[in-house]
Image (tube, helix red, strand yellow):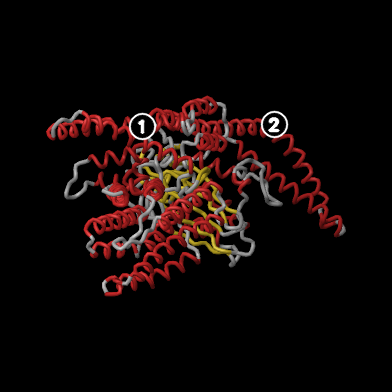
Amino acid sequence: MNEPLRVDLVISIIAFSLALSVSFRSTRDKQQTLLSVFSFFIALIFLFKYIFLETSTHIWLRLSIGLLIPLPIVALFLISTFLKEENNLSIELYTIQYIFAPILIVGLSTPIFNNKEFVWFSISYVFGMLLFTFMNLVYISSREENRSQKKRIILLSVLGTLSIFFSILALKIKSTLLFSGTDALLIILFLYYISESVLNGKLLDLQEFVSRILILLVISVIISVIYWIFVILISYKPSDMLLNSLAVSISITLVFDRLRQYVAGFISSYITARKRDFTARIKRLRKEISSIIDAEILLKRVVDEIFASQKVNYCAFFILSEERTYYRIHYALGQQIPERIDNIMDHSLIEMLSEQRQIIVREIMEKRYSQEPSLPEESSQQLKTRDALNSLVRLDISLIFPVFIENEMYYLLAINDSGVPEPLNAEELGELIELLEQVSVSLQNLRIFEGIKEKDRLAALGEMAAGLAHEIRNPLGAIKGAAQYLNPANLPQEEAEFLKIIIEETDRLNRVLTQFLDYSRPYQGESSSVSLDNLLRQIIRLFSSDKEQKYSIRYSNSSEDSIVKIDTEQFRQVMINILKNAQEAMPDGGEIEIKVYKENPIGRKILSTVLMREREGSDKIFIDITDKGIGIDEKDIKKVFIPFFTTKKSGTGLGLAISRKIIESQNGKLEIFSKKGEGTTVRITLLSFSPESLK
């Protein structure tokens, strides 16, 4: 076999191998499907070319050129889809190819194909479109802000351009050879680079690419040497060759994974210098966690350390949204991070995390799913596993860990390590799991610590309030009595105004003192079972009866039969205070929405195992009071429950603090979610009972 034929056959075999490796994957996205098509096209082009050169039958040349003509549009579609970039030049290239490709393909079936100029024009068209496609990547890289991604796009452009350029240089025209020969090495390198990038969801940098090439070469050489020794050197007859080939194939299959891991570790450690002491880093972080007393600092330290190990593409903490309908990014580092994890689209993944309460590793789940027996109809568990896997693939998550706070799945830590030179191994994964379990415990303890600090604050306020009550109220009463004795009606207007101010200010100071005592005094109310719907409707009628028309209240309740055990008078005080705050946040008027629901407003209880069944016969019910007012600054959100903190000119800063204390004394919870300029939602969570459970 001469050299050109050998090159064509090698390229065809390798391209077929890449195409089949993608096609046999259990789950494929659009990019991987395009990669498989692109690889099949190249494999068939060179296979048909090889057959043509062997047989000199022109039908194979027609087929080869017929597949070559649409190759640029497949390449452009693959690259645009993978990079998610499409500029004006890309659109123009699409237009040109949509026009010329059908014309050229039709020309193959006509006598014009026998014209050498037509063949030359077809080949020139293909090379030209491919060159424009790869040169366009340089322009795309110039617009890329991320320097690392910019270098990777340029690397893709250089590999593609060089493979086309050397293919043109290798083009020879002979009497029986009307097709180009290409530099096999560059085409194989380009195919391998684009396939590894697509399969790993990101472009490889130069060091990663060199590392993977070296791993592939070393393993290939080792396997080739083994075959050469056992099949060629020590095989004396055909039967020996067959037996030795079988024995060697079985042996290599058994040790291949270990061999690949060893070679990858060796190259990473001694050639590319990419070894990272991940275990030591995690152990050091575990020692630091016990001294961190701020949840935000703790979360950031975990993400910073994991990402700094360069073992992952990204690391992100997701936090449960205010509406409990999705998880949004709380703190993250890396590239191509999903914006949110949705309770509807990813409900199987959410349910699995809430049920198992432990880390989920995509690779392990894929193996378990593939090993399950295939049935005509999948079981509910298999369907859930498949849906969860699809979510992990869509979100590009390698492993995900739930963090529970007060029996609620509050945080999710998502990590992607696909495509890195040294992904997390079993030992490192074990260290990471221990770290995350410690983080979960620490966050629970920090929540308890915040509660202890609040109790200490209340105790200190109680002692201070008891001591100051008489010291302030006695002279306050004397001041007001003296002012009333002077009788403003018997004085000139100016002096009378001053006396009125004295009386009004003593009344205001007395109200502040009363609120202060109410806040520090232990709860002494009596709870009773009432219909929450009836109680809320009474409060709304009471509040709306004498208010301005510019305010309106929209009420909805998806659980009208719910019974709650609360002190009705104190609950009415809380609701009136919240509604007054909502009105003050909308000085020009507006609508206040009160929404009551037992589960997520989306109508599906996706977090049913997480959103708290705390006792037999009871569940939790949520009351959301939402306004479209001025909102609260992010820096002030955590301060709104601190006594005497207020942003109002005439506020005491005790209303919300007292409200939260009342709700918590009823075994409930009061939270505030707000965004400056968009409005505020106050959420009250109470234990709810069905009428049957109280009988």
Report the side of 103 relative to 534 (left or right): left
In front: 357, or 2?
Answer: 2
- Name the residue nearer the viewer: 126 or 599: 126
Label 2 element class: helix
Q: Nearer the viewer, mark 2 or mark 1?
A: 1
Name the spot of residue 584 as percent of width and height, x first: 63, 57
Residue 115 appears in view: yes
Question: Looking at the rendered structure, which numbered label has been put on residue 261?
Answer: 1
Task: State the image quarter where residue 489 is shown.
Answer: bottom right
Judge by depth and name the residue closer to the eye, 651 or 601. 601
Picture layout, residue 246 above or below residue 319: above
Name the residue carrying label 2: 467
Instruction: Name the spot of residue 38 as percent of width and height, x first.
Output: 34, 56
Among numbered discs 2 and 1, the one appearing first in the sequence: 1
Q: Identify the residue at the far left of this view.
A: 239
Q: Amino acid at mark 2?
A: Gly
Q: In the picture, which quadrant includes the C terminus?
A: top left
